[in-house]
Image: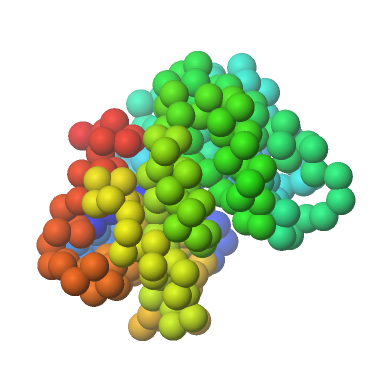
Amino acid sequence: MFIDSHCHLDFPDLAGKLDALLENMQTNQVTHALCVGVNLENFPRVRALAESHPNLFASVGVHPDYENTAEPEVEQLLELTNHAKVVALGETGLDYFRLKGDLEWQRERFRRHIRAARQCGKPLIIHTRSAAEDTLRIMKEEGADKVGGVMHCFTESWEIARRALDLNFYISFSGIVTFKNAAIIKEVAKKVPADRMLIETDSPYLAPVPHRGETNQPAFVRHVAEEIARLRETDLAEIAKATTNNFFNLFKVA
């Protein structure tokens, strides 16, 4: 079986299609999915998805790309994570690609997520783009290794992956690993230890080959696993078993 460790089922492209999405998951042996929060305003929708289906889980956080949104306080994040179906903090992190200028507010927001995660003991879901050095530095400074988490939709080099692994983090691969021009990510997928690897869709974005250009959905995470199995020259069942076990171990769900 397969698990989509990162999707956005509340986003407009997927909202209202839940029954079909769940049916497609079942057809493709995708047993669970983690619905990831990106701001506080829409978090109730994310939590409601998890509450309404036993195989869906939720996370709470404010994405670094959301500039004009309510800033999360540590106490608020702790209150929202105090829920059986909320299994992680995030997504959080740094993004120097989409936004420019003085981004100290991003870094401070990131620090608050890490501090909340350390207090509640739940793992972090980290987004980083064009900001790997600062991301790793803040993770180290704030003691993110005490709770661990996942570097979601990983697009960096093996050197960055190795440093994240050293900080007690998992590496998650999205549909990008199936793209022909993703040589660096394919190389990382060959090297990451089997017990520290996750798969995801980041639905509705980044649909894998052979669905590239379509609206992504959790059922397509199977293609991510197939590509990783090909790259590592191993059985698909081995990738399915490893990534499923890793999801349960990291997010402490049964």
Q: Say which quadrant the C terminus sits in.
A: top left
Residue drawn at x 39%, y 62% is 188
Toward which corner of the image does residue 230 lie, by quadrant? Answer: bottom left
- Up the image or down, 145 lies above or below 166; here it is above
- Up the image or down, 177 lies above or below 67; here it is below
Toward which corner of the image does residue 41 lie, by quadrant? Answer: top right
Name the outermost residue toward the right: 101
Q: 80 and 139: which one is in front?
A: 139
- Up the image or down, 143 lies above or below 37; here it is above
Residue drawn at x 33%, y 68% is 224
Q: 254 and 238: which one is in front?
A: 238
Residue 147 in the figure: left or right of residue 75? left
Toward which corner of the image does residue 43 lie, by quadrant? Answer: top right
Residue drawn at x 78%, y 55% is 99
Q: Is residue 79 visible?
A: yes
Residue drawn at x 20%, y 59% is 239
Name the outermost residue toward the front: 159
Q: Say which quadrant the N terminus sits in.
A: bottom left
Q: Residue 179: image x %, image y %?
A: 44, 78
Q: Residue 222: image x %, image y %?
A: 27, 67
Q: Residue 221: image x %, image y %?
A: 33, 64
Q: Residue 125: image x %, image y %?
A: 48, 41
State the scheme by which the image is colored.
Answer: rainbow
Q: Is residue 14 visible?
A: no
Residue 92 in the figure: left or right of residue 19? right
- Up the image or down, 1 lies above or below 44; here it is below
Residue 67 in the figure: left or right of residue 182? right
Please give the count of numbered marks on the rendered protein.
Answer: 0
